[in-house]
Amino acid sequence: MAFLAVFALALSFATGRLADRWGSELARSSTIRISAPAGQVEQQVQATLRVLETTPGVSETRVLGEDEQRALLEPWFGPDLPLDSLPIPRMVEVIEAGDGYDSEGLRLRLRAEVPGAVLDDHTRWRRPLIRAADRLRLLGWVSIGLIGAAMAAMITLAAQSALSANAQVIRVLRLVGARDVYIARAFVRRFTLRAFLGALTGTILGVLAVVLLPSASAEGGFLTGLGFQGSHWLWPLAVPLLAAVVAFWATRLAAFHALRELM
């Protein structure tokens, strides 16, 4: 269970980083697509740049070259795409500054001054991606909660079985004057220690497995960035401690419940 908890933590933190990266990268940039007859494309590109120069909140603008556009289209159409013979729109990248620009105001200006220009501020792409990453992060934390609940259930059943198997010993202890608190403490100590050592072993194996995962790369995307980063490596240390706490309370409750039934 601790092994699975480590991977659930890794998934939760990785999706958190993914949501932050998608939000920051897509939120600060946008593109303008310019579609016009062949003889008017360059004229509308220059008109678009002039509009952007006088737009508050725009930090940088850049017209994408043919090589960049070919690289963007290559995954869908292959490397031999004839850009010269296809009516592909020109693309202008816009980088925001400070609090950003007024997207609706810029759309209105472009519609009036550059009829062939269309602004895409990536809102329709950013929101679903961030929402999906946030749900994956929530799924990781829910998985950790379910793992803790399953661990508590297994420890409770194990404690009840151990108490039932030692019913005769418990009766003898009561006859010699042992109180239920003393008897329960012995079981609680034993199961808590075993749960801590088992969780520690599972955590170590889980961390080693996470270390062996491929490192983050642009080519691999999300699937190669499932490890921990920075201070997040300290979080797996809490798994054995939490397992011991769960074992303590689960065993204590099960022990007193079973002792009452053995009276």
Image (tube, rainbow, N blue to C red):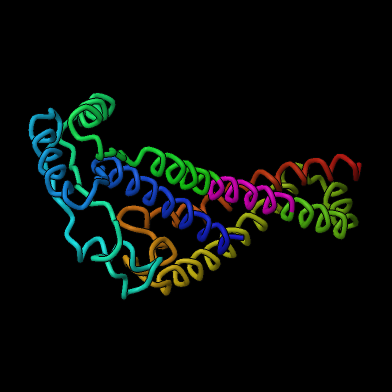
Occupied quadrant, residue 202: bottom right
Where residue 163 sits in the image (x, y, percent)? 82, 54
Residue drawn at (24%, 35%) of the image: 115
Read off the magenta span: 139-153
Occupied quadrant, residue 190: bottom right
Measured along the vertical axis of the image, is residue 125 above or below residue 237?
Answer: above
Task: Determine whether, in the image, residue 174 is placed left or right of residue 188.
Answer: right
Q: How many marks?
A: 0
Q: Nearer the viewer, residue 15 or 239?
A: 15
Measured along the vertical axis of the image, is residue 54 above or below residue 187?
Answer: above
Residue drawn at (24%, 41%) of the image: 28
For residue 16: magenta?
no
Q: Nearer the viewer, residue 90 or 84?
A: 84
Task: Determine whether, in the image, residue 27 is placed left or right of residue 190.
Answer: left
For residue 151: magenta?
yes
Task: Determine whether, in the image, residue 105 is placed left or right of residue 197.
Answer: left
Residue drawn at (23%, 65%) of the image: 84
Measured along the vertical axis of the image, is residue 231 above or below residue 70?
Answer: above
Residue drawn at (56%, 47%) of the image: 139
Task: Determine whether, in the image, residue 76 is placed left or right of residue 85.
Answer: right
Where residue 149 sits in the image (x, y, percent)? 67, 47
Of helix, strand and loop, which mostly describes the magenta segment? helix
Q: Nearer the viewer, residue 96 or 161?
A: 96
Q: Nearer the viewer, residue 7 or 3?
A: 7
Measured along the vertical axis of the image, is residue 123 above or below residue 195?
Answer: above
Quarter of the image with the N terminus is bottom right
Where residue 247 sits in the image (x, y, percent)? 64, 51
Quarter of the image with the C terminus is top right
Where residue 45 sits in the image (x, y, percent)? 15, 45
